[in-house]
Image (tube, rainbow, N blue to C red):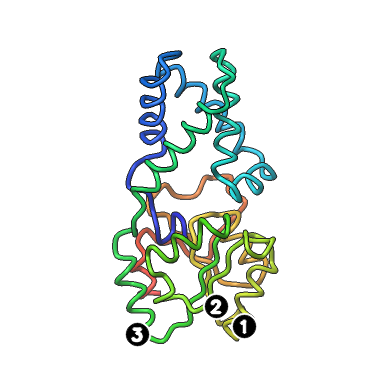
């Protein structure tokens, strides 16, 4: 779902910059530039660890508050309320820009018309992901919707993919996995025997040393129709 069919129309860096500017103006204890610098260091460290990533994505506000608190300590500030306010401000800024990628709605509509069985597999917290599903009425397209936070496991766990196959009543050989995350979407699905299509919307291409090799790479969701 995230970064495959839905995207933020503002960059993370811009959203963090805006949240830091708001906090710096309110607190007057540090500059926005200083705060942004330390938040960038702290968040890169936080999300770099796979286990922290798994735990953090199930409660983004708590995760963000955690590494913002680390950043504030570097500035001599240990007021947790400020950390919560910055995390909340960032969340409101970024969530307000969420929208479909270009051509996604039309593609999903065409797939439904063609009677293609669709399952939505998403990591993250149950409540947060359900809100997005409701907000963008994704149940119009996906009869099966699996959320990591509601099941206790998610991508790249084979159980996640096998549950989707079971609910759709299809085999791996009949299935395509379409996703943006090489490790969680592509490698995870391939382990379950599913043909995997990597969405490289930014046309960055695979790194030369990439251990994950998608079965197919697309730069626009509409390319699915030509496969």
Give residue 171's mark. Answer: 1
Residue that appears at 32% across and 47% down: 9
Q: Position of residue 88 (x, y in %)?
A: 46, 38
Dot 3: what SS?
helix
Give residue 175's mark. Answer: 2
| Disc 1 crowd, CA 10 A, few/some/many (<14, 14-19, 20+) | few
The answer to whether the residue labelled 3 contacts the one labelled 1, judged by CB atoms less than 8 Å apart, is: no
Quarter of the image where one finds residue 156: bottom right
| Disc 2 crowd, CA 10 A, few/some/many (<14, 14-19, 20+) | some
Instruction: Give the mark toward the camera: 2 or 3.
Output: 3
Q: Which residue is mark 3?
A: 113
Q: CA distance from mark 1 to mark 2?
A: 7 Å
- Total of numbered circles in the picture? 3
Q: Position of residue 224 (x, y in %)?
A: 39, 71
Q: Position of residue 74 (x, y in %)?
A: 57, 16
Residue that appears at 60% across and 86% down: 169
Considering the image in quadrants, where does the C terminus appear? bottom left
Residue that appears at 45% across and 13% down: 29
Mark 3 and mark 1 lie on one chain; the one further toward the N terminus is 3
């Amino acid at each position: 779902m995230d970064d495959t069919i839905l995207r933020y129309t503002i960059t993370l860096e811009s959203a963090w910059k805006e949240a830091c500017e708001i906090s710096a103006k309110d607190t007057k204890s540090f500059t926005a530039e200083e705060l942004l610098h330390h938040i960038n260091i702290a968040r890169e460290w936080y999300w770099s660890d796979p286990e922290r990533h798994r735990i953090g994505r199930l409660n983004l506000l708590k995760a963000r508050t955690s590494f913002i608190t680390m950043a504030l300590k570097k500035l001599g500030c240990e007021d947790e309320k400020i950390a919560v306010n910055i995390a909340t401000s960032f969340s409101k800024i970024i969530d307000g820009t969420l929208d479909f990628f270009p051509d996604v709605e039309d593609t999903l509509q065409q797939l439904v018309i063609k009677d293609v069985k669709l399952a939505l597999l998403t990591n993250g917290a149950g409540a947060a992901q359900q809100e997005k599903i409701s907000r963008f009425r994704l149940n119009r397209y996906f009869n099966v919707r699996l959320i990591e936070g509601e099941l206790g496991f998610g991508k790249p766990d084979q159980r996640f993919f096998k549950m989707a196959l079971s609910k759709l009543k299809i085999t791996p050989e009949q299935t395509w996995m379409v996703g943006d995350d090489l490790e969680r979407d592509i490698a995870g699905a391939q382990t379950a025997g599913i043909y995997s299509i990597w969405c490289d919307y930014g046309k960055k291409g695979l790194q030369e040393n990439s251990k994950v090799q998608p079965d197919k790479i697309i730069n626009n969701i509409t390319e699915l129709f030509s496969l």
